[in-house]
Image (spheres, helix red, strand yellow):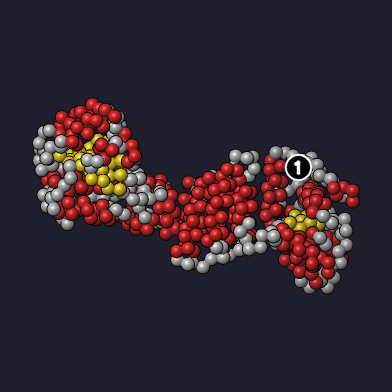
């Protein structure tokens, strides 16, 4: 197969296609137009920003017979035979860092060019040369023959000796802007007939951190065997967090939406996103928000000072990740601090609301008066329901409830409201499990006896019931299915007042139970 990776396939052949380095390109084009060349150039900057590509286009333009607006024409002998032209010498110092290669190069420098006016030497990753190789190079740079032009490229300018730097015209390549990368990728995707979301393009640009080569490599990987590239797919593939997700998190913070914020943190926790990467992205996002508040006067619930403190908190949390606690809990605690009423957390708020309502209803179930008792009772009843639950019985009862509830006169008021909203998800002849929204769960579980009495009046059977949120139910159901697979046994535990404090035994007999 002659598959060419995108980065090579779409490597710019002229100055116009090189993106994000306008100042450098203009300067180089001017020197081509004026035939005014330095003997040595050094291109420095992060990987994938176009240093080598620019060096090649420039090398071609230097000798091109008919440059078009300073770019190589692509038609003359020199342009056509660029890749096998003995006057263009390209060395990768990362693999040839020895003094021998440089010696050979220097011997070659003295010879006049074969075809063109200049011999152009491109030395990539020049910082990798050994000290003696640098010294040999320096001798040439000190007294270069008139026909030689050196273009050195490096990702690590600090490691290039000052003696070399002082003999070069220096160009610092910048990371490519997100929008420029998106534009270039869109063009390439269109030519490759790749379908890709705008959000996905943005995410690739973001992941590539300003390097076009990395962006196109990512695109290469993602496009294999995929008709359409979406943001979700990228997140799955690279186990990453998109800019959109980070934006969502801060938007919830700005909207003071605690529930959604905690839900999102939970999602990230479940996806086991690397905490350091997450914090880095949060800090990036928070600082650009802080800047927007300060510079563009952008309206926001949190102040500049809030964001400043939040950034410090987030960075500080990195010192705590070695302690054996869930780092996401630390993150939750940090973020909760920035919701508008820090004294009322989610649970406290609901407790307060519920206490107000509960006072008004006839609250019979005095034994279930604290959360521990309630949690034990919930566990006991889930266990007991799983012991004898029957799918056919569940279906039968569900139908019956749908028929009787709306017109029931025996069940009315608040309880009717709760039951109509609730879904019966598991049933045995003794136990029922309902799911409903979080608020109703708390209210209903505090008036179980009352609800049981109502159900008995319509169904002529005494059931022990419990209400769960859908999330909790899904977790319980997964545990149950897991237990079945592991052949754990469920055992019915008779409910007595004094039993309610007991932790449920995990001896279960599941053999007779159908999966719900
Ligand atoms: Zn040409």
Residue 239 relative to residue 149: left or right? right
Classify 320 as above or below 232: above
Residue at figure coordinates x 69%, y 57% from the top left: 470
Dot 1 corresponds to which residue?
511
Asked where in the image residue 43 lies, by quadrant, the reply is: top left
Residue at figure coordinates x 81%, y 57% from the top left: 465
Residue at figure coordinates x 18%, y 45% from the top left: 38
From this viewpoint, is residue 177 visible? yes
> What is the x, y in percent for residue 348?
73, 59
The answer to which of 240 and 298 lies nearer the viewer is 298
> What is the x, y in percent for residue 215?
38, 49
The answer to which of 401 and 49 lies nearer the viewer is 49
Residue 126 relative to residue 310: left or right? left
Label 1 sits on a secondary structure element that is loop
> What is the x, y in percent for residue 180?
34, 57
- In the picture as drawn, the residue positioned furthest to the top comes out as 100
Label 1 lies in ligand 1 vicinity (Cβ under 8 Å): no
């Amino acid at each position: 197969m002659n598959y060419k990776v995108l980065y090579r396939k779409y490597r710019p052949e002229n100055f116009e296609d090189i993106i994000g380095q306008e100042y450098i390109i203009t300067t180089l084009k001017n020197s081509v137009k004026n035939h005014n060349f330095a003997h040595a150039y050094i291109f420095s900057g992060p990987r994938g920003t176009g240093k080598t590509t620019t060096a090649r286009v420039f090398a071609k333009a230097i000798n091109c017979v008919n440059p078009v607006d300073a770019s190589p024409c692509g038609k003359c002998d020199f342009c056509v035979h660029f890749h096998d032209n003995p006057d263009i010498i390209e060395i990768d110092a990362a693999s040839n860092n020895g003094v021998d290669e440089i010696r050979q190069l220097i011997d070659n420098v003295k010879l006049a060019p074969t075809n063109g006016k200049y011999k152009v030497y491109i030395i990539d990753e020049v910082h990798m040369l050994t000290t003696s190789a640098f010294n040999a190079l320096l001798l040439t740079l000190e007294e270069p023959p008139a026909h030689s032009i050196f273009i050195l490229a490096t990702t690590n300018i600090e490691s290039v000796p000052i003696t070399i730097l002082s003999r070069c015209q220096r160009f610092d390549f910048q990371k490519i802007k997100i929008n420029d990368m998106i534009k270039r990728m869109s063009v390439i995707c269109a030519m490759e007939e790749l379908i890709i979301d705008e959000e996905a393009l943005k995410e690739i640009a973001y992941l590539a951190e300003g390097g076009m080569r990395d962006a196109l490599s990512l695109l290469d990987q993602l496009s294999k065997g995929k008709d359409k590239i979406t943001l979700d797919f990228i997140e799955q593939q690279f186990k990453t967090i998109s800019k959109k997700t980070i934006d969502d998190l801060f938007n919830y913070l700005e909207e003071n939406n605690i529930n959604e914020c905690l839900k999102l943190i939970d999602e990230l926790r479940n996806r086991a996103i690397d905490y350091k990467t997450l914090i880095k992205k949060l800090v990036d996002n928070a600082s650009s928000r802080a800047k927007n508040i300060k510079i563009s006067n952008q309206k926001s619930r949190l102040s500049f000072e809030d964001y400043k403190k939040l950034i410090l908190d987030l960075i500080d949390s990195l010192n705590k990740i070695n302690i054996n606690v869930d780092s996401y809990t630390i993150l939750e605690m940090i973020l909760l601090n920035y919701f508008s009423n820090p004294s009322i957390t989610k649970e406290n708020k609901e407790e307060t609301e519920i206490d107000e309502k509960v006072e008004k209803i006839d609250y019979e179930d005095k034994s279930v008066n604290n959360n521990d008792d309630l949690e034990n009772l919930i566990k006991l009843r889930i266990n007991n329901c799983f012991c004898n639950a029957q799918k056919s019985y569940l279906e039968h009862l569900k139908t019956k409830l749908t028929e009787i509830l709306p017109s029931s006169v025996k069940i009315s008021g608040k309880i009717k409201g709760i039951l109509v909203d609730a879904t019966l998800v598991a049933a045995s002849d003794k136990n029922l499990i309902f799911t409903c929204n979080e608020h109703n769960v708390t209210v209903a579980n505090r008036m179980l006896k009352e609800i049981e009495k109502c159900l008995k009046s319509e169904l002529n059977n005494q059931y022990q019931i419990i209400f769960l949120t859908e999330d909790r139910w899904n977790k319980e159901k997964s545990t149950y299915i897991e237990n079945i697979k592991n052949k754990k046994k469920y055992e019915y535990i008779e409910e007595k007042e004094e039993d309610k404090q007991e932790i449920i035994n995990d001896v279960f007999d599941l053999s007779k139970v159908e999966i719900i």
